[in-house]
Image (cartoon, rainbow, N blue to C red):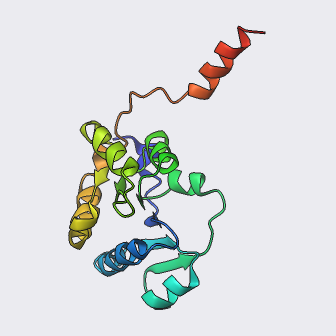
Amino acid sequence: PNQKFHDRLNNKVYVSVGLNKEESLFIFSHILRAAKNFPELQFIVLMANKKLKNKIGIRKKSNILAVDYLPNLSKLIESATMFITYGGYNSTMEIIASGTPSIIIPREDGGKVEQFVRSYVMKPYSLFKICSVKDLKNISKYIEEILKEYNNFPKECKFNLNGTKKTAEILSLYK
């Protein structure tokens, strides 16, 4: 195992699954229920919608912290024990670049299929766990699996993430 990677086991789980959607409320409620099974972890939930916060009613003394905003989320993800997200393009790239153990819950409402397609196309690479909205009742199982498999992280990623640099090199040829 990569010791530098395992030194970052800081027990922080960042959760970013949307701001204003009713589907978000459904997802948050399942994650918050699951958090009770992992008192050693601190779940930091991005939740800018005050109505949503009030509906969920997070207790002050729980292992859940709801925040409106997190500056430099990329760096926080890099040092996190785990990341739970919808799996938008940027979040998925953060997971791949950082190697952070993650659970993707692809959006399924509103006819949006981009996250669903991306997550399942990448599934064979085993870079993250996928939990469908229909399987949220088992989110604790996915969290537990990641914690048990922690010695297998970071997963080897064979994707070239230097596209910006390569594009700049190509464009410089056309001066």
Residue at position x 43%, y 66% from top? 11
Relative horizontal placement of residue 163, taking residue 126 as reference (left or right): right
Relative horizontal placement of residue 14, taking residue 111 as reference (left or right): right
Vertically, is 153 above or below 111? Answer: above
Residue at position x 47%, y 54% from top? 8
Relative horizontal placement of residue 56, taking residue 103 as reference (left or right): right
Question: Looking at this view, is 49 or 4 the one in front?
Answer: 49
Q: How many marks?
A: 0
- Tell me where residue 121 sits by quadrant: top left
Question: Looking at this view, is 172 or 77 the one in front?
Answer: 172
Quadrant holding the N terminus: top left
Relative horizontal placement of residue 76, taking residue 61 as reference (left or right): right
Question: Looking at this view, is 38 or 107 the one in front?
Answer: 107
Q: Is residue 153 visible?
A: no
Where does the image place residue 56, in percent across and percent down from the top left? Answer: 43, 87
Vertically, is 141 above or below 32? Answer: above
Q: Is residue 147 visible?
A: yes
Where does the image place residue 35, in percent across and percent down from the top left? Answer: 34, 77
Where does the image place residue 14, in percent across and percent down from the top left? Answer: 47, 64
Where does the image place residue 86, in percent across and percent down from the top left? Answer: 41, 58
- Tell me where residue 162 sits by quadrant: top right
Furthest-front residue in this view: 111
- Tell me where residue 170 sits by quadrant: top right
Residue at position x 47%, y 26% from top? 160
Question: Looking at this view, is 116 or 137 the one in front?
Answer: 116
Furthest-right residue in this view: 175
Quadrant holding the C terminus: top right
